[in-house]
Amino acid sequence: AQADTTLRIGTVLAPNDPMGQGLDKFKAEVEKATGGEVKIEVFHNSQLGDTTEMLDQARAGANVGTVTDVARLSSFVPSLAIMSAPFLFDTYDQADKFALSKEYLGWGDELKEKSGLVMLASNWYQGARHALTQKPISKPADLAGVKMRTIGAPVWIETIRAMGAEPTPIAWGEVYSALQLGSIDAAEAQPTAIWGAKLYEVIKHVSLTGHIQLVTALVVSAESWDQLSDEHKKIVRDLAVENGRYASGLTIELGKEAMEKVAASGVEISEVDLAPFKTAVASVYKLLDL
């Protein structure tokens, strides 16, 4: 059993990923700001399960939180899916501003009522998602028949389908072996994750589609959250936003380095004309009423 003043946060990512570094800094600053009255335990590398499993645990009342793409939360509050819509944001600053808007924060309040999850901050930027394939692609037709791993949420699935591939949701921890064994043909991921998960060892091409800007949320179980005092809640929320910005800055900085290292490993990295992809995914907005 956990003390009332402890929040347990898990992530599928490695400790050196910007999100992992951001969570470790968040832990240290919360504990310092509360004089140790609120403790944060961080679990990296899927120690508490895949993202979906951690969300399920949190909803069931377990003292578990995680960093998740907000599209996974849209089954409770459909409006949240807009954050993961294809080609919506050009810069992190645009996403950060939107995440702190009155309307978006209102959807966060609605999320607690409908799901038992509390969104502490929605500005943890993980980078632009690019197509990882075994053959070069330059247009949607090149992805015909390609089984591409994606996140198991409607906006992701429909985006990948609109781009021409066959969306194949599997756990992040299984992507490397699935690519290695050929049970999937392709994946899509942000630069730091391509490097952190060593996917450069099992793919040949990265096409810089940037089809979705992966802006994620730090969420915790409402049951655990409600055990904190109002004073501590404000400290934790403020530091969640602040460290979201810190982690996002690392994402931008380390993303460039990661792509340089991926290229040095022998993977071919290609610029692509985004116009046909943007045209192809326009249908996603209508289909999901975004």
Image (cartoon, rainbow, N blue to C red):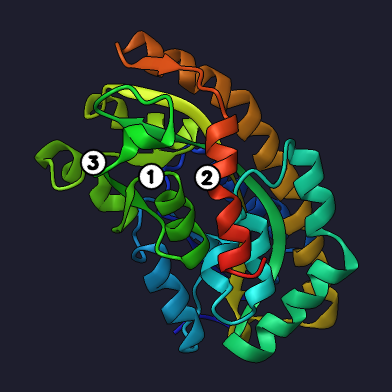
Say how many tags the image has. 3
252, above or below 257, in the image? below
Picture quarter containing residue 251?
A: top right
User: Is 182 left, or right, of 223 in this rendering?
Assistant: left
The location of residue 174, given as percent across then percent down, is: 24, 51
User: Is 172 left, or right, of 202 in this rendering?
Assistant: right
Circle nearer the N terminus (1, 3): 1
The crowding category of the residue bearing disc 2, from other C-alpha atoms within 10 Å (few below 14, some 14 to 19, many at least 20), is: some
Q: Residue at x 51, y 32 (%)?
A: 209
Circle nearer the N terminus (1, 2): 1
Q: Report the mark closest to the observer, 1 or 3.
A: 1
* Secondary structure under the numbered disc 3 in the rendered image: helix
Q: Residue at x 55, y 48 (%)?
A: 281
Numbered mark located on residue 20 in the image = none
* Secondary structure under the numbered disc 1 in the rendered image: loop
Residue designated by label 2: 280
Circle nearer the N terminus (2, 3): 3
Which amino acid type is marked by label 2? Ala
